[in-house]
Amino acid sequence: MTEYEMSGGRVQKSGGKAAKILYQPFGIVGSIVGGIVAGQVFKQVYKRVAPGHPDDAPTPLQSEYRLREILLASLIQGAIFSVTKALVQRGGARAFEKLTGDWPGD
């Protein structure tokens, strides 16, 4: 069962070791799906941020792009992947808790 602890004024849920182990396959599938979704979101955002550029964002080894363009693309991509990862992990943990009654985290 899920235990609740007070930590710095916040209520923190903690699950057991079994919940963490059972959650791992859900986490792996969620990571794969999240990566695919984040990649598609990034492509759409990059098309709007850099109109006139090819569909694919520049990579660090493409000499025809200026460093500023490469850094901007990397910054946008990193932000999108980070936010998507957090949303997918949190949503997966909540769904797992609804199914099992245990929180899969610390």
Image (cartoon, rainbow, N blue to C red):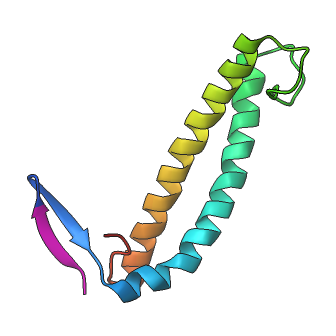
Q: Position of residue 75 (x, y in %)?
A: 61, 27
Residue 38 locus on image (x, y percent): 66, 46
Residue 35 in the image: state x and y as whole percent. Answer: 67, 53
Q: Nearer the viewer, residue 7 or 37?
A: 7
The part of the image, by quadrant, that contains residue 27 is bottom right
Residue at the spot x=35%, y=70% of the render? 105
Taken as a whole, is the magenta stretch helix, strand or loop?
strand
Inspect the magenta stretch and tell me whether residue 39 lies in it. no
32, 61: nearer the viewer: 61
Judged left or right of residue 64, residue 92 is: left
For the point 37% across and 76% down, the residue is: 97
Q: Quadrant of residue 76?
A: top right
* Residue 62 position (above or below residue 65): below
Q: Which residues are magenta?
A: 1-6
User: If the image is split into quadrants, where does the C terminus sit?
Assistant: bottom left
Quadrant assignment for the N terminus: bottom left
Q: Position of residue 72 (x, y in %)?
A: 66, 19
Indicate whether residue 2 is drawn in magenta: yes
Dividing the picture into quadrants, the one containing residue 95 is: bottom left
